[in-house]
Image: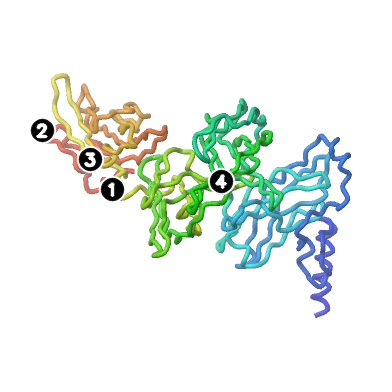
Amino acid sequence: MKNVRLFKLTASMALAATMGACTNSSSPEDDFFEFTSSSKGDSSSSSVDVSACKTVKESLATPTKFNVANDSDSSWTFSWEYTRNSDRPETGFRIEYLDLDATNTDWKSEGTTNAEVTLYKLQGKSKVGKYYRVVAIDDCGKSDGSNRLQINENGSTSVSTATDADLGVPTNFAITDTLGENLWLVSWTYSGDKDSYVLQRFIESKNAWEKFLTIDDRTALETVIDTAAAGKYIRVAAVYEGKVSTYSDKIKMPDAVVKSTSTGTTSTASKSSCKPAAPTAITVTRIAPSVWQLGWTYKEASNCAETGFIVQSLDIDADNPTWKDVAKTAEDVVNYKLKGDKFREKFYRVAALNGDKKSDWTDQIKVSSHISYESVYNFTKPEISARVYSAPDGYEMQLTVTTDTPNKNVLNSGDTKAVDFAFQLAYGTGDVKDTIIDAYQESSVVMKFKSVEALCNSYGRVKVIWTDNYGSSDETDWSVRKGTRTAYSSGLTDQEGLCPYVYKDESSSSSAE
């Protein structure tokens, strides 16, 4: 037993020597945990020279190749690579986590290590389902985050990182019009890169700013503000590829005016309403290349009716992921259509509304390209038939799509811009060539030949391309090859017997692909 204890101590000392000691490192009795930290704060000193930090020009290098090893169903080992910036070496690393189920989603500290320690032990079943990343830290700040990983019971899933952007600052932020009672138009100017805008309001009780509105229209330079920010200071920032610009100067919104039900006079009291029941069973189906239909089930509480629903989205690739309002539906409308690529690869959730109250949220659901099309849209690999015949100048082979692909629901959809066929054809003894007929709206094509020899060694295949009204396309797999070459002649129609020899080896012929 003593020999075993000695081996563990020697291994721990060697690990500490090569990687450096960690914050709150444990005794040799704890064996493998020399590189872990249970600290929830930074490993930097508590006394920071603020004036010195203002003169720092170099950035901390970003950790790379963040990885996880699954030690057990409740224990994982993080590792990463780091090349120090010699002009600004790190004093440690911080593991950060993101919990999608939290009320206010933001990256929070899980624990820290000391300088040059590029391993971290994570333990506990409560860690499952969260996203993790690592940042380098020192007394003056932190680096950009590494790639993200999600811990699940079967291992981990990598999530791509957002790129940095050099953003400007929105200016001239002001109230430009009063649209009605408790409705104001605010506007700003901005000339930098942006995907969207985010607005914050100041909550005096918390002495903190919080997001309350996201505008996904990148061309917008104005928005309507209602009672959600009445009486509060607000400000606006641009968002580009997951990065948030510096916020504009703040402005003070007027107080809300609410009519009193007892006297008919006005006051600044909040509107009273009840908390409705929560929607359930949120689903998503794909109905066009970049169109998805969210749906949910709702059972109204007897004492509190819903007046509509609110849909929110969350972009996990954003540097500071936050649930953002996407839309509000009318009363009894239990679905919402997401149109365009900007809605892809995000999480969604729904809550019921009643006045200024909302229900608990549904579970979140992810929208992605892997979601199958709704069953009424038959958008699968087509099938084709081939027939040959004599023509005035030689011979012809006609290839025709025989399956109902795409079906009338695809063709007649209000989201469809175009449906095209792409044919790949092989003449004579050659292989299938590059696409020679593309963006072709007819479901059949005729191949022309001068000689029967070329006719009787040719074939082709087809795929369908679906383009929607929002600039995105999707395509089916290629059909099985069909034609007169023996391997692909199954189902060939040759009433004139032009290619009799293609049937000589029919017993050994194979299907396409």
Residue highlighted by disc 4: 228
Q: Nearer the viewer, mark 1 or mark 4?
A: 4
Q: Does the rendering let one see residue 487?
A: no
For mark 3, what is the residue?
Answer: 489
- Structural distance between the alpha carbons of marks 4 and 2: 78 Å
CA neighbours of label 4 inside 10 A, class few (<14), some (14 to 19), many (20+):
few
Estimate the spatial distance between the alpha carbons at disc 1 and disc 3, rounded to whole Å. Answer: 32 Å
- The amino acid type found where label 4 is placed reads Ala
State the residue lying farthest toward the left.
Answer: 496
Kind of residue at badge 3: Ser
Question: Do the CB atoms of the residues marked 4 and 3 lie less than 8 Å apart?
Answer: no
Q: Which residue is depicted at the point 55% across and 62% down?
A: 154
Foreground of the two, 139 or 21: 139
Query: Cβ–Cβ below 8 Å for labels 3 and 2?
Result: no
* Quadrant position of the C terminus in the picture: top left
Q: Label 2: how many residues lie within 10 Å, few (<14), some (14-19) or many (20+)?
A: few
Distance from the alpha carbon under mark 1 to that under mark 4? 41 Å
Mark 2 and mark 1: Cα distance apart in space = 40 Å
Q: How is the image coloured?
A: rainbow
The answer to whether residue 305 is left or right of residue 232 is left
Q: Are marks 2 and 1 in contact (CB under 8 Å)?
A: no
Q: Given this view, does label 1 or label 3 mark the residue nearer the observer?
A: 1
Q: Nearer the viewer, residue 50 or 7?
A: 50
Q: Report how far apart the C-alphas of labels 4 and 3 lie in the structure.
A: 68 Å
Sequence-first disc among 4 and 2: 4
Q: Depth-wise, is mark 2 or mark 1 nearer the camera? A: 1
Give the SS element for disc 4.
helix
First in sequence: mark 4 vs mark 3:
4
Image coords of residue 339 (percent x, y): 42, 39
Q: What residue would you read off at disc 2? A: 496
Q: Quadrant of residue 503?
A: top left
